[in-house]
Image: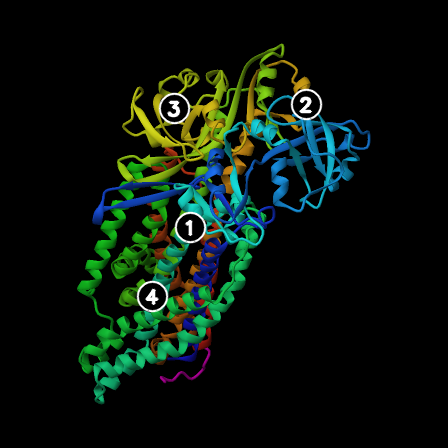
């Protein structure tokens, strides 16, 4: 293999291993990531409810199951503490409650400026979990007593015996700081155990039952599980997941996203690498034919190719695998800084992604090289020599059949995207693009010939000599051209689909929220949430006509017509005059029905054949299964969530009873509310819509990572493939010089041929992206229009055209720079 071609193949394989390994780092981090074990460090185990919903159908060999994570804590009954205490070696069981508390003011003038500080409240029994001691004062004994940690007390300028005004779920209240604690975590506030249970809103259910061992005793995890069947017993590092539930939720999301993107990245890498290696093998057709002519067997020929691929692929893949650790760490850091992953999410680095990505890359390279050399090694030497000069005009039967299968599979996914809607349609977009691109790659020679006919005609008219030379050369080398246009089409289709699907979804979300928000003002909080007491107070203000309390969550519901498949859906709990403050574009029923318990409203994207009056089963945020009556159907699911529920039902199964927003109609003065409730502030309807649009963009950051990482690899594949294809034409270009073509004529013909190649690839990619985006817009957003920013579109085209042209012309100038050409 020529040095230049070998270098291009090695570079592409190294980048492929690096991209695959980076996603492997994210997957491994998701598998191994656990929250920090701080407060539960002395515990033998933390017992909590399962943080996922699992649906099992069928039995025996037909048994199927699927799980979805929960976003709210699945609390555990405090009555189970007795069964845990009976297990051998258990010294004590602490019912742990955690609730956000906002400092609304203090009796100390020094601490007056600390209003708005957010603390975490626990019951006093939870002090046993850490080395907490009383530095001064006494433990809380009444419902109005609290113990504050020393660091926070010093920051607030508070001593034992001082008053402290706190804001929880209701109106701000005055508490007495009965004591100052030392040795425990900062930002901690302790109530009496009974008061913490009452304030949590779930007195009979704790966030976790923390098992403390007796002195010198060992507690069996299996015995704990047997004592409380149906609950999850976390030991070791898994205790950190119970203490930091955001880490566990982030792990679920990261595993799902990284796994999907890793699979797409693998298919893309195979697509790019296969075309590149096919070109490198075709460049050696004449050499392989000579080997056959002098007596080499087909097996010997294939062995030569495989050994050569191994020599190139192994070091390249290992180098890319090692580099993947750095890329994976950079991706993780970027995701954490942009809120895709929670703070404290640990990075796991090990040799597994290095060797895993290297092994996959080597197998892909060797397998592709073996397949590319298989036909050349089997045909007769004379025929092989002929094909080294002129490509075959007919496609192999296996290529036509396989390409047709991918085309049919893509058509099926296209129908699914149109009809299923919701998350099912969104998740099928990447598979739809890859399926259609594999069909383009396999049937590429047909596409290449058709593209040459379309683009070659105007070039022949404008430049009769060089235009005809470019078009004839491209048409004669349809197989080579197909291998070149595939990565170009892939770059345009994949980059355009991923990027413009996000812009379409974000703009649709913003448009629906903007058009459907009837409230004139919105009350939000800079703290953990809006106390529900603010809702009651807002209704009493003069000049306020309508108020709606909004509490967001995520529910799990079976996919329409697929009993074994579950989907996580955004949901909102509403209380008050929702019909006057928001318009989700109700198509049947009325939002007034949500004032009754046991009701639900569904967007048309997830309702499908459901009618008003039907019942639907779903799981609330903490995993509680409910059957609800459908009272309304609406169209604006992106702007207001796919599920609307009574607010009290959502709050009863959420981490806190705090609301997210209050939607207000009227001209009344809201300053009494913002003065009474710490952190509460007013936003206009336009600001509220902008915030939702920004959130939609943040939700799509993982997809943006995919665009940057995978599209970057594709662009490198484009440059490498075009460079290899041009370098492999040394003999052809030299022969044209010998028969009279000038250097300028050949360079001009190559520029025109590059226009044909990039043009055909861009048109093929645009066609795939267009079909996919139209299906996405219709199936996911429900809107017939796409949002394609012109600058972003021009950027994608320029990112393909500029380096692609350079990859052709730079090696071509080097080949044609000799004054006296000779065939080597």
Seen as rendered, the residue at the extreme bottom is: 294
Question: In the structure shown, which secondary structural element does the residue marked by tag 4 occupy?
Answer: helix
Distance of label 2 from label 1 (alpha carbons): 44 Å
Which secondary structure dominates the residues rendered in magenta? Answer: loop
Residues 209 and 633: in front is 209
Residue receiving disc 4:
275
- Mark 2 vs mark 1, foreground winner is 1
> Pointer 2 and pointer 4: residues touching (CB < 8 Å)?
no
> Label 2 vs label 4: CA separation?
70 Å
Q: Quadrant of the N terminus?
A: bottom left
Provide residue 139's location: percent of width, then percent of height.
70, 34
* Disc nearer the start of the sequence (3/2): 2
Q: What segment carries the magenta color? A: 816-824
> Picture quarter containing residue 528?
top right
What residue is pinned by disc 2? 173
Whether residue 499 is visible, yes or no, is no
Please tell me which residue is depicted at 68% across the width and 43% down the height of the picture: 132
Q: Position of residue 450 (x, y in %)?
A: 26, 56
């Amino acid at each position: 293999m020529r040095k230049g071609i070998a270098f291009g193949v090695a570079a592409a394989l190294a980048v492929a291993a690096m991209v695959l390994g980076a996603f492997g780092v994210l997957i491994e981090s998701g598998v191994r990531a656990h929250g920090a074990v701080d407060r539960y460090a002395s515990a033998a185990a933390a017992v909590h409810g399962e943080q996922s919903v699992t649906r099992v159908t069928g039995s025996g060999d037909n048994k199927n199951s699927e799980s979805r994570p929960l976003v709210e804590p699945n609390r555990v009954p405090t009555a189970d503490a007795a069964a845990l205490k009976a297990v051998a070696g258990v010294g004590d069981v602490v019912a742990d409650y955690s609730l956000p508390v906002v400092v609304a003011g203090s009796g100390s003038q020094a601490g007056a400026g600390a209003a708005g500080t957010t603390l975490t409240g626990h019951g006093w029994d939870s002090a046993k979990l850490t080395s907490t001691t009383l530095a001064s004062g006494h433990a809380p004994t009444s419902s109005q007593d609290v113990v504050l940690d020393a660091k926070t007390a010093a920051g607030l300028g508070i001593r034992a015996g001082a008053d402290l005004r706190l804001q929880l779920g209701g109106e701000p209240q005055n508490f007495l700081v009965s004591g100052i604690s030392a040795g425990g975590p900062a930002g901690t506030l302790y109530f009496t155990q009974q008061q913490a249970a009452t304030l949590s809103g779930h007195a009979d259910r704790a966030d976790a039952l923390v098992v403390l061992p007796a002195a010198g005793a060992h507690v069996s995890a299996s015995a704990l599980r047997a004592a409380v069947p149906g609950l999850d017993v976390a030991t070791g590092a898994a205790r950190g997941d119970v203490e930091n539930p955001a880490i566990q939720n982030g792990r679920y999301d990261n595993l799902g996203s990284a796994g999907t993107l890793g699979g797409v990245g693998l298919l893309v890498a195979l697509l790019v690498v296969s075309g590149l290696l096919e070109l490198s093998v075709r460049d050696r057709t004449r050499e392989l034919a000579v080997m056959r002519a002098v007596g080499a067997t087909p097996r010997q020929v294939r062995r030569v190719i495989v050994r050569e691929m191994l020599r190139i692929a192994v070091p390249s893949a290992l180098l890319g695998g090692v580099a993947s650790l750095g890329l994976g760490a950079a991706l993780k850091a970027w995701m954490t800084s942009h809120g895709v992953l929670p703070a404290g999410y640990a990075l796991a680095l090990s040799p597994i992604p290095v060797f895993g990505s290297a092994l996959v890359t080597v197998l892909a390279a060797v397998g592709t090289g073996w397949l590319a050399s298989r036909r050349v090694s089997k045909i007769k030497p004379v025929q092989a020599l002929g094909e080294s000069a002129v490509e075959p005009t007919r496609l192999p039967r296996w290529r036509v059949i396989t390409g047709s299968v991918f085309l049919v599979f893509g058509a099926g996914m296209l129908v699914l995207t149109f009809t299923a809607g919701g998350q099912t349609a969104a998740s099928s977009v990447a598979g739809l693009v890859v399926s259609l691109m594999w069909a383009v790659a396999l049937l590429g020679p047909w596409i290449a010939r058709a593209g040459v006919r379309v683009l070659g005609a105007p070039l022949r008219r404008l430049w009769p000599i060089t235009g005809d030379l470019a078009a004839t050369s491209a048409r004669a080398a349809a197989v080579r051209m197909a291998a070149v246009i595939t990565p170009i089409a892939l770059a345009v289709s994949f980059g355009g689909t991923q990027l413009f699907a996000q812009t379409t979804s974000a703009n649709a979300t913003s448009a629906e929220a903007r058009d459907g928000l009837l409230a004139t003002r919105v009350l939000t909080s800079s703290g953990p949430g809006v106390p529900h007491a603010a809702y009651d107070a807002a209704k009493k203000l003069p000049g306020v006509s309508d108020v709606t309390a909004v509490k967001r969550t995520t529910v799990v519901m079976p996919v329409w017509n697929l009993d074994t498949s579950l989907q996580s859906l955004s949901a909102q709990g509403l209380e008050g005059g929702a019909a006057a403050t928001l318009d989700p574009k109700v198509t049947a029923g009325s939002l007034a029905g949500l004032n009754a318990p046991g009701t639900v409203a569904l967007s048309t994207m997830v309702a499908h054949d459901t009618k008003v009056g039907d019942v639907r089963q779903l799981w609330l945020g903490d995993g509680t299964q409910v059957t609800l009556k459908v009272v309304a159907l609406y169209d604006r699911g992106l702007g207001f969530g796919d599920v609307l529920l009574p607010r009290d039902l959502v709050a009863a199964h959420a981490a806190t009873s705090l609301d997210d927003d209050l939607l207000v109609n009227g001209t009344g003065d809201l300053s009494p509310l913002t003065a009474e409730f710490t952190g509460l502030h007013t936003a206009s309807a336009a600001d509220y819509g902008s915030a939702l649009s920004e959130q939609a963009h943040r939700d799509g950051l993982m997809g943006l990572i995919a665009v940057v990482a995978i599209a970057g690899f594709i662009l490198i594949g484009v440059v490498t493939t075009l460079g290899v294809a041009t370098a492999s034409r040394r003999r052809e270009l030299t022969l044209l010089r010998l028969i009279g073509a000038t250097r300028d004529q050949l360079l001009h013909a190559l520029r025109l041929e590059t226009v044909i190649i990039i043009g055909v690839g861009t048109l093929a990619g645009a066609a795939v992206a267009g079909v996919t985006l139209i299906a996405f817009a219709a199936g996911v957003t429900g809107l017939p229009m796409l949002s394609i920013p012109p600058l972003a579109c021009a950027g994608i085209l320029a990112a393909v055209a500029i380096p692609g042209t350079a990859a052709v012309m730079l090696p071509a100038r080097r080949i044609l720079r000799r004054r006296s050409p000779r065939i080597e």
